[in-house]
Each structure stands twice: as C-alpha cells, then as structure tokens.
Image (cartoon, coloured by chain):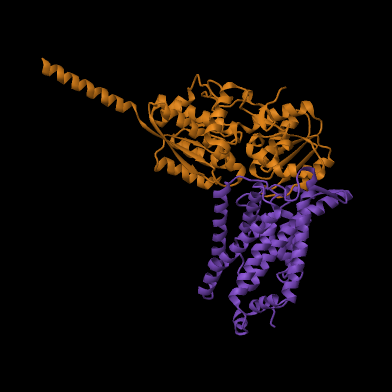
Amino acid sequence: MNVKRGIGWVIGIAILALSAQAVAENVKVGVVQALSGPPAIVDFGESYLQGIEAALREYKAARPKHEVEIVTYNDEANPQRAVSLVQRLISNDRVSAVIGTVNAASVVAFSPILQQAQIPVLIGPSTATDITARFIAQKPSYVFRCSMVENHMIDAVLDWAIKRYKKIGLIHTTSGYGMFALAEIQKGMAQRNVQLVAVESGAPTVTDMTPQILKLKNAGVELLLVYHDSPELIYRAFQKVDYKPAVAASWGLSSKMTVNVIGKDAIEGAVMAQALDLNNAKAKGFDEMMTRALGDKYRWPVVAALGYDAMRIMLGAIDRAGANAARIRDALESTEGFAAVSGIPAKPFSATDHECVDPSQVFMGVWRGGRVVKLDN
Amino acid sequence: MIATDLVQVLLSGIALGSVYTLLAMGLFLTYATSRALNFGQGDFLALAAFLGMAGMLAGMPLIAVVIGVAICMAALGMLIERFAVRRIISRSKAGAAHLGWILSTLGFGMMLQNVIALAWGKSRYYSPPLFSSGEKQLVSLFGAGVFLEELAIGAAALVLAGTMYVLLYRSDWGRRVAAVSFDRHTAMLLGIDVKRTVMWSYVVMALLTGAAGLLVGPLSSIQSHMGMLFLLKAFAAISIGGFTNPAGLLIGGIAFGVIESLSNYVDSTFGDLYPFIIVLLFLIVRPMGLFGERKTDVR
C-alpha cells in the first residue's frame, strides 16, 4: 500500500513538473530600431528602445510566467538593411514577434514579410499614416502599431491653428516625410477652407535656412508650421532676420534634444501634437522612473512612453499566449484593461483597428519652462 | 527682392562660402604635395566643431579653445599623412593600387566619425557662441542681421587665403611646395625634404579645416557625420575656382555659397540642387575653373 502511495506521489510530482515546464516558455521578441543615421531619426529609435527596455526590466523583476528575451538590431534607417534584419529575425533568431521601427520606408518594406510569415509586428515609432490600413483587410492582419499617426497629429495642429491665426505658413524638409507632411497639410487646409500663405522647404542636409525664413517673414506668416528635422536652423534664422512667429510642429519638436540645441527661452511657447500628459500621475511616475534610470540619456518622454506601453502590451499578449506567433497576434488584438502611461486606451486594438493611438488621444502640447506640458484650450 | 533681403542672403552665402573656401584650400594644398585628396577632411571639420563645443561648454577661454583645437588638428594632420597617405603612396605602383589613399583617407575619416559618435553620441548639437551670448551675438550690417561668427569666418577665409597666397608664392616653404608639386624626385635631388614638406602641407590642411570647424559650430548644428556634405561643397568650390591658387578657391567658395543662398531664396524646393547644376554647366564651358590653366603645365 505504502509502495503504491509512494509511486502515486512520484507520478504526481512528475506530472506537475512537466506541466509547469510546458507552461513556462522562452520567447524571443525581435526589436528593429534606427540607432545610427540621421540624428533626428536616431533620437526616435533610441528613445523608443529606452521604453521597450524599461518595460522588459519591470517584467523580469516581477517573476514572469515566461522567459522573454529581446533581440535588438540597428537598421540604420535603411530599408534594405531593415528587411534583411527582419529576415534574420524570422529565420535565424526564430522570434515570436517583432517591434519597430521609426523609418516609414523600412516599415513599408518589411511589414509584408512579417504578414506573410504570420509573425505579429508592433510598429513604432513610425508615423506614416496608412501602414496598418494596408493590412487590416487581410484576415487576420499581423500588423499593429503603437505610435502617433501623422494625419492625426496634423489634424490636431490644424484644428488648433486655424482658430487662432489667419496667416499660416509651412516650412518642411524635402525628404519623404516632409513631402508627405506637405501633402497632408495642404489637404487638411483645403478641407478647412483655408490656404497656406507661404510654403518653403529645405533639404535634410541644409546648413542655413536664412533665405527661406526671410521669405516667410516677407509673406507675413503669423504661425509657422515646422516639419523639418533641423528646427534649430529655423530658430537661428529667426534671430538673424528679427522675426518671431508662433511655431507649431509635429511631435519631433518635443524632444529634449531639440530644446538643448534651440535653447529654453527661444522654444518657449512652441506647440506640437502629443499623446503623453505629464500632469497625469502615471505619466509623471514613468517620467521620474526614466529620469532616475537614465539621467540625461532620457530625452523624449512621449516616444519612450509609447515604446514602454508597446512592450507592455506585447508582454501582456505573450503572458496569455506563450511563444506561438499566431496566438500572440490574437492576444494583442484582444488586449483589454490595459493601463497605459501614454494616451493609449484600455482596449488598444480591435479586429478593424490596429492603431493603439486614436485621434481622440492626441492633444496639443507646449514648451513651458523647459518642459512639454498639455496646452490648455 | 528688396535690397535688405539681398544683403541678408548675400551675407549668409558669403559665410557658408567661406567654410567651403577653407576646406578647398586644404584639399588644394595636400593634392599639390602628395597628389592625394583627404576624403576624411570633412570629418576633421566635424571633430574641430565638437572639440570647440566641448571647450566652450567647459568654460575654457576662447584663446585656450583655439590653441587646443589647433594642436589636436595639427596632430591629426600628421597622423593621416604618416599612416593613411605616405605609406600607401610609397608602397604602391602605378595603376589602380595608386588610388589606395582614397580608401585610407576615407577610412581615417570614418574612424574620426566613430570617435565623435562614441564621445558625444549621434545626436546633433549647437556649439555655444564663441564671442558673446544672447542678442550680442548679432550685429547689423547694411540692415541685415549677421552673427559674429559669420563675420569671423568671412574674415578668416579672406585673411587665410591671402596668407596662403603669400606663403605659396613669396616664401621658401611655398617654393618647396611648388617643387614637390612639380616632381617629388626632382625636388629630392634639389635637397628638399619632401616628406617634411608633404607632412607640413597636411598640418596646414588640418589647421585650415580646424578653423572652419571651430567657426561653423555655432552657426549650424553639428553632428558626427556632418563632414561629407561640406567636403562635397568644397569640391564644387574647387571646380569653380580651379585647382591652382588660393585666390581662385576663395572666389569659387564664396561664389558657390552665394549661389546656394540665392537658390534657396528663389526656390527652396530645389535649393540644394541648383548650385550643383550651375557648377556642372560652368564646367562644360570652363572645365579648368576660373583660374585653372587650359594647357598642361610643362615647365
């Protein structure tokens, strides 16, 4: 009898051990970000990655269900390299999911590969408007995004701008991003029955923008929409031609790197689209935690917060689904009750919407005393 | 275009053109002595800008910053000549291998880029003003606002081009450079220390580039990979002025800067393209540049 009982105990313990082993899985998540290349792009890539790593640190410290590891690659903002890295993540690293990247051309290039391989991708911080829309009709779509979306930001900026200013001008970069912003802004202005009084541009490699700013001044522009990667050159030219228009911009203007190069006083009052309200207790806590952990290297609260939230959504999905890519996709889509530090809602995605930031969560931020705070309407 | 605008645009162009001039003079000098162009010269400019910024932010007096940057640049000039040019040229035979210096100078420049990225990261920076701060940075010239650094870089280009002209055509060092440039073996037979002359030409190149880097820092944002663009425009300045003397390079550099500035005023969409189209058209008409010699020098 005792022998039988002993055998029963041994079998029971073995079953328990085996089942525990079956539940805890090793899960690899590929992260592709631009960590070298044009400084404005690198700023996005590094900040988003800071958020991802912070979320993973927290997850690991909380005795997680699964062993999650990130495999990080630098795509150098180069679409060809991004595609090759994603292929490497699929074939060599055998990742269950991918997060990345900032460059829209890279995202457009590698998303179909991940869709075909049936590996979920959480895009960020790329803002190009139609990325998830390209795949949403495919059932199921493996392409999700956790980032601001360019046309949401442009709408927020234009809604704010036309109520306050009659003469609105634009300065944009001639890169793909700048030309896209130009088209979206012109479309948005036409929809609101107003027109830009002046449009100037500068190549991404420009080193002086005095001539362009002079023309904007001559056109009497009261509010300047800035969609250029080097806003500091624009502010330098303001000084030279003795011109101080109001400035509104994409979220690129909210990086602390920008205030470092433009100066706290010069940038005071500049507004931009945002999705992180630092007056909110959770956002404030996140900001303090990141400042403590990274010091000066932490430059961009909204981008880092979106990276942090993206990784937490991913980790939540992995907790529920394990290492199986298809199940992670389903778990991402069905995420509920998510407590974000940024403006992401409790249910970030649905079968028809793979954007975690909706237009309703986008608001205007403003530089006040060296910090970006929510602009009171 | 109203007169004040024209002055403003011209002054901006002259300031930019002065940077190209200083770089072009460095290219000219090293090519004259070693028949090699330093493709890493743009990265010398970037390093000088970062060193200048670091010195100013550390609260060092301007003179100490200038001396510090000059010492570093001179040392780098010697290093690149010794390890990336002299060894390659002395060991190579005629033919394709003779172009090894392209890769070695480019590689040297890339190492500098990475050193900058390691020390300061890949972000962009503004160097603090060299001469004053706040509103005092600006002076009014014919009704146009000009940064003191813009005036300084214009003056530096003018003075250094003049000095270079005098040194090249009125001094023993200039005669040695001319001899080495004409034929290094003949120069050696004449008792000229060719290695030393070449090395000093690289030191002067590095000092000229250092001056440009120090002054461009507060005018434009600086970043680890900023050099190649300036270098490309310095080549354009050479194409206009001709690869012959500092006066031509000064005129070529300023002309390119002014064309660039005017292009951005007239049509900023293709503001960076028009100057290169104009240079291409100019080269069709006058391939040797403004001051270049039409025939091969057979002295």
Residue B259 appearing in the image:
no
**Camera-nearest residue between B277 and A85:** A85
Task: Find the residue positioned furthest to the top.
Answer: A1
Picture quarter containing residue A237?
top right
Residue sitting at 70 percent across and 70 percent down?
Answer: B243
Chain A is which colour?
orange
Q: Is residue B21 left or right of residue B192?
A: right
Q: Is residue B269 left or right of residue A84?
A: right
Residue A284 appearing in the image:
yes
* Percent of width and height locating residue B294: 73, 75
Picture quarter containing residue B248?
bottom right
* Percent of width and height locating residue B254: 77, 60
Q: Which chain is purple?
A: B
* Percent of width and height locating residue B275: 74, 57
State whether residue B23 is above or below residue A92.
below
**Camera-nearest residue between A254 and B238:** A254
Q: How many marks?
A: 0
Q: Looking at the figure, which quarter contains the C terminus of chain B?
A: bottom right
